[in-house]
Amino acid sequence: MKRMTVFCAALLTISMLAGCVQTTSSSSQTSTTVQTAAAESSGIDLNKRYEYDVREMTVNNNGEKIWGELYLPKKDGKVPLVLTSHGMGANHESGASYARKYAPRGFAVYTWDFRGGSNANNENRSDGKSTDMSVMTEVSDVEAILDAVKSWDFVDNDHIYLQGGSQGGLVTAIAGLHRQDEVAGLILLYPAFGMVALGAQYSEDMPEENQVGSIIVGRRFFKDMAEADVRGDLQNFTKPVLILQGSEDGLVTPQSSESAAQSYPDAEYHLIEGAGHGFSGEHHDQATNYALNFMANIHK
């Protein structure tokens, strides 16, 4: 079977969007202030801590298994739920770092492996092949999970949040447009809206398999990008949106994320100084505090 390695600069850039992480020191004073403000201004006490359990949970999508982990706080009553979408070539661990911050504050988190969404260096416990994966198959996975959580009796269905980073941010934005009535808000981490340019690479003569960086994708990956350009539709999503972007991100530019924030009717945008493509260390602390603040202000 022929395989084409894509050398186009745009594709090589996108191939790195799986979630590379840069660590740069920064002041923690801002993030502490954000957390305290959220605790005082909403009905959720973010200073309170809960123990939590981690469970393996699977969801079916068209006869294929989506495998994930549920972080469930030990808290009376129904709890808000965050569904986290990982970036291209990554896996559920991308969302686990946020789950370990959200769950002690009383938010359940489900983080999963997209079907065929991981490269050879990241274990994927879901069904499917990377050559069958596209942004739209990942949107389908998010929608299947939204259908499944309706039967989870611990979920506060009025407070379900979608979160995604990089390609997962684009997936989250599309799924939000499709299922707006079922979500309370979106959290977009350095969302890769620029990936839609890959649709122009598609042709029927394209090889069945294409190497994009460390992951092998099929024709469908490019073809489905024609459906993924939702930037002109963002004004139709009227629920609250939080967009977090690193100032030193060389893959998703601050200008791209700021433009998306301006397109949404109700968006909060924060530029995290010194952060690159992916948040770690104190940048991750700032991101989680912004997200907790955002959700707490909705969950009153």
Image (spheres, rainbow, N blue to C red):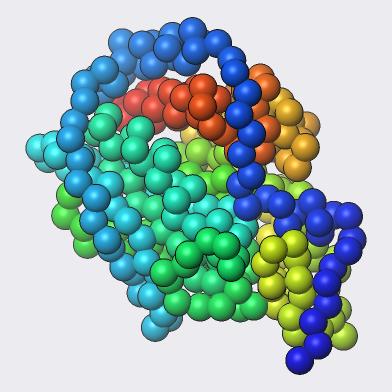
Residue 118 image position (x, y, % from top left): 56, 64
Residue lying at the far bottom in this picture: please name it: 1
Residue lying at the far left in this picture: please name it: 76
- Left/right placement of residue 149 relative to residue 19 reads left
Residue 111 image position (x, y, % from top left): 39, 53
- Left/right placement of residue 156 relative to residue 215 reads left
| Residue at image coords 79%, 51% | 13
Q: Quadrant of the N terminus?
A: bottom right
Q: Quadrant of the C terminus?
A: top left
Vertical relation: 158 (above or below) 204 = above
Vertical relation: 125 (above or below) 31 = below
Work out whether residue 26 or residue 162 is closer to the camera in this orientation and state it: 26
Residue 147 image position (x, y, % from top left): 34, 64
Residue lying at the far front in this picture: please name it: 121
- Left/right placement of residue 266 relative to residue 223 reads left
Is residue 258 shown to the viewer in this render?
no
| Residue at image coords 77%, 75% | 210
Work out whether residue 295 or residue 281 is closer to the camera in this orientation and state it: 281
Is residue 248 shown to the viewer in this render?
yes
Work out whether residue 285 or residue 43 is closer to the camera in this orientation and state it: 285
